[in-house]
Image (spheres, rainbow, N blue to C red):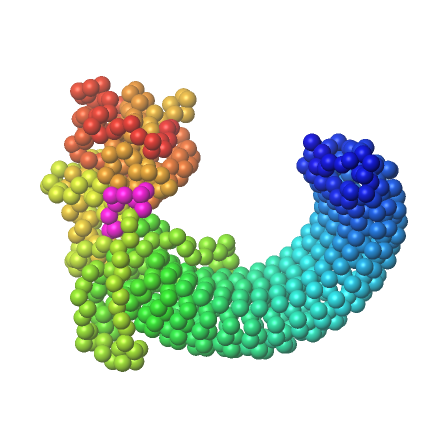
Amino acid sequence: MPAFFCLPMACQRQVDSIDRSQSNLQAIPSDIFRFRKLEDLNLTMNNIKELDHRLFSLRHLRILDVSDNELAVLPAEIGNLTQLIELNLNRNSIAKLPDTMQNCKLLTTLNLSSNPFTRLPETICECSSITILSLNETSLTLLPSNIGSLTNLRVLEARDNLLRTIPLSIVELRKLEELDLGQNELEALPAEIGKLTSLREFYVDINSLTSLPDSISGCRMLDQLDVSENQIIRLPENLGRMPNLTDLNISINEIIELPSSFGELKRLQMLKADRNSLHNLTSEIGKCQSLTELYLGQNFLTDLPDTIGDLRQLTTLNVDCNNLSDIPDTIGNCKSLTVLSLRQNILTELPMTIGKCENLTVLDVASNKLPHLPFTVKVLYKLQALWLSENQTQSILKLSETRDDRKGIKVVTCYLLPQVDAIDGEGRSGSAQHNTDRGAFLGGPKVHFHDQADTTFEENKEAEIHLGNFERHNTPHPKTPKHKKGSIDGHMLPHEIDQPRQLSLVSNHRTSTSSFGESSNSINRDLADIRFIDAPASAQNGVREATLSPEREERMATSLSSLSNLAAGTQNMHTIRIQKDDTGKLGLSFAGGTSNDPAPNSNGDSGLFVTKVTPGSAAYRCGLREGDKLIRANDVNMINASQDNAMEAIKKRETVELVVLRRSPSPVSRTSEPSLNGSSHQLNHFDAGSPDSTMFVTSSTPVYAS
């Protein structure tokens, strides 16, 4: 339906704008050409393949938008439209511009992006009124050598092309405010780039630059500078002499240090310097007192300067994947800090002054060597996420008080402490850390502390005098997410000092008072660190032995009493080897896992459970039971695994080895104990092996079958 209505006697006087966008046009409608005084014509997002020559008789046309069409040629008659001020040819297939474009002297906005141009005619620079020129994604290898003639140009966009050099005349664009040369093949910038004194935004990311011209400090109006993803080794020493710079992105380069003038960037609010080769962070950083976000991940930093505490406006500090062994006490002065991410370093302790960061909501210290946390963490009443492990999945963490015998002060701990690296002693070098930056997961678990009366710690009086008074605030217990309903938090039970090196998990040893869901959840975290070995030939009734690797013996000792009590009750371990049949099927189905609702009747346990074993199938013959919980599949840990993880592990081999946790006697499938050697075994079924209807009911829980 036409977007206009006209009276036959007056249409030429009344119609000055027509919008036929998104009208599925194959050609320009003939009725448009009747309006000789038409000024604005919008034909965007149609299927027009060529421009009718009658279009160029509309001499009053000022705005022409034919973007998102199928034009292959721009006729030379475009030069007849001498009143044009805006021409949009974006997203067509035009390979060449006619020289007659120079006749459009009034043109101010020209959009040629997403066309297969390889060059522009030099005559385009005679349209000296152009203020916005868009040349993104046009396959350009060169810009016009006389581009400096566009003296009124304010915005030049030439992103995603094949440019290797920039014409020297570009520095004559004294009114240029925005220059985007990102994603090209530039190896150098003009030495006199600093003459662009009006430049406010400069993007030259994803190129092959090895340095920046010293003259760039002459761009004193520069507000945003992005030189990320290049090969820059050093920044200009006078970089700090850009007083208006607020956003600096130097990520993914080879920069080894920040210039000494860096502290002069008084208005700098965000610095992204991750994935470089920084070994030291200049102490001048403390003078950038407007800084709110600082990203230093994946470098080679061994420490942070004490002046980091001068950044009173800092809200986000990310120093992931470095070689930090400690954090300066001055971090407590960063009162505005909300996100502190120190993942994958070699930290052995956190300063007690961290308790002064009263606005901290996310603290990520996973993959370090922390044996415990400072007791002042308890006063971080706004803390919403505390990350201590790469595999942490609990929605709630409970921290309990203990004593650091080495220093004689109180600290807090939980079942994830001491960290694995603190036991294994696995050092990391910065060179191995240049991987994808995981960063802090902002939607992490809540933190909850035991309800305890405030006490005075006699042994910490000296520390309190030094740190100031810490006021403890009540932290409300957050609601448990629906997908974790019924799970427990795995709070560490009291340690037992002397523990044997070997642990036998034997069914029917004694009756456990814990429910099925509670037992399996609390045992999961410790089972993840047990290395299972094949049972001797004399093993009977599903008895399996599991031995601890020496380097993890200390960690297991801290919670062995909990594990032994639970494992020795109504559950035991089985290793079952299943040879796939001719169809490649195993004949089993399982449900649950991370990212899905718990399996039916699992009491909220988030693990993977076998929900069906097809009678006569390979899994059936080898003794797998409905209700078995997957612990390992082909040496892949299935604790805290998803259904996709399980399917991937099972499909890798023709012979599948499963380690499962089983209640005995099983309330799910009423069978006698099957043999564990994978051979066929006579099963005494009361109901032909069908699942017990009281255990598995119809559910919307996702189920995988194999």
Magenta segment boundaries in residue numbering: 481-490
Residue 609 vertical position relative to residue 198 in the rendered view, above or below: above
For the C terminus, the quadrant is top left
Res. 269 visible in picture: yes
264 lies left or right of 149: left
Residue 457 vertical position relative to residue 510 in the rendered view, above or below: below
Residue 616 locus on image (x, y percent): 30, 20
Residue 296 locus on image (x, y percent): 50, 65
92 lies left or right of 352: right
290 lies left or right of 692: right
Residue 385 vertical position relative to residue 172 in the rendered view, above or below: above
Residue 140 magenta-highlighted = no
Residue 459 locus on image (x, y percent): 20, 76
Considering depth in this image, is 475 or 259 the residue closer to the camera?
Answer: 475
116 lies left or right of 445: right
Q: Which quadrant of the figure has residue 4? A: top right
Q: Main secondary structure of the magenta part?
A: loop
Query: What residue is at 30 percent from the left and 80 percent from the top?
Result: 466
For the N terminus, the quadrant is top right
Query: What residue is at 23 percent from the left and 76 percent from the top?
Result: 460
Residue 73 locus on image (x, y percent): 82, 40
Residue 488 magenta-highlighted = yes
Query: What residue is at 65 percent from the left and 64 percent from the top?
Result: 201
Considering depth in this image, is 680 or 447 the residue closer to the camera?
Answer: 447
Query: What residue is at 76 percent from the left and 36 percent from the top?
Result: 6
